[in-house]
Image (cartoon, grey):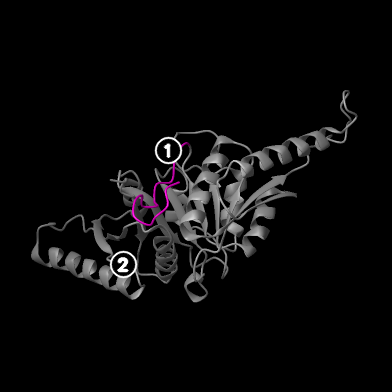
Amino acid sequence: MGRVAKSIVIAVDASERSLDALTLGRLLVDSTAAPVVLVSVFPLDPLADPDEVHYTRAREEARTILVELGEEAGLPAPTAQVIAGNFAARELQRVSEQEATGMIVLGSTHRGPIGRLLPGGVGERLLSGAACAIAIAPRGYADHPAVRLERIGVAFDGSDESRHALEAGRQLARSSKAKLRVISVFERVAFGAVATERSGASVNQRLRADQREALAKAAAEQPHEEIESRLLEGSPGHVLAEESAELDLLVTGSRGYGPRAAVLLGGTTHTLMRKAACPGLVVPRGARLELVAYGGDAPAP
């Protein structure tokens, strides 16, 4: 018997960004066959008795609405969970720490530009220590969603964290039959034009060659039928944001230091999360993405 996939949790609130999160969540559920849970944080009156009839009724009504939203979004058999609490970020952080949670899907803040990622307060909190992968839909994503995952990009810099992101991207690409693009961005270093003693090549030339070799090796090690590697040059966050316009999902790793099995953004990913034109997925440091169901028709990684 195969392993049971962890759940995709979609955070739902009363704002328009919930439609974006629901739409992205449906796409990821369709691509992975993972079970889905809709979660909403129910405001808690500190003076109210949680056992009062009206309080219990309100929570049940909220749960019913969640299920209806999920069904309207085309989600298969959605489970609804209403959490009592006045701090959504804190409650979702706790959800991220649950063993059954494989990913939390959020929408972008309504204050951001249409078609761009811009995490709000809750998203910023979860991108600073969540214990599971975090996916964020651009603002307005529900208006122009991808029909399916056709092209998945992975940001690769040779670090262990980017290798975990590459493994996650390959897993998603295989389960959704998508093309996989591995993107590495070379950023020139100051005084890198100085020639090295042995070869006569400059420091920047040597660094670029090493990065190209690492990228080619990583791409060759991935057992995926349609894989493309790109070595570009410039500021990584801005270059990756430009590449995101051609992608249905861009996967990145967490910062290379900090707690293991936690999401923690570095400078490049932080910039990317604010400028990307496609949904972004950040994988926890040192953790695998465990969403694709094993057994049946779902392919194992």
Image quarter (top left, top right, bottom left or bottom right) of the N terminus: top left
Seen from the viewer's position, the closer of residues 273 and 230 is 230
- Residue at image coords 52%, 61%: 279
- Residue 222 image position (x, y, % from top left): 57, 44
Q: Is residue 300 magenta?
A: yes
Q: What is the number of the mark on residue 1?
A: none
Q: In which quarter of the image is residue 260?
A: top left
Residue 154: image x %, image y %? 58, 50
Is-magenta flag for residue 263? no
Task: Tell me if residue 207 comes above or below residue 28 in the rendering.
Answer: above
**Which callout, 1 or 2, points at the residue further toward the start of the chain?**
2
Residue beneath the point at 34% across and 55% down? 296
Three-letter code for the amino acid on which mark 1 is drawn:
Ala
Residue 76: which disc? 2
- Main SS of residues in magenta: loop
In the image, 263: left or right of 84? Answer: right
Going by the numbered disc 2, the residue's amino acid type is: Pro
The residue segment tinted magenta is 286-301
Residue at the image position 13 percent from the left and 63 percent from the top: 56
* Residue lying at the far top of the rendered structure: 197
Q: Name the residue under label 1.
A: 261
Which residue occupies the foreground of this view, 160 or 269?
A: 160
**Which of the two discs, 1 and 2, sits closer to the camera?**
2
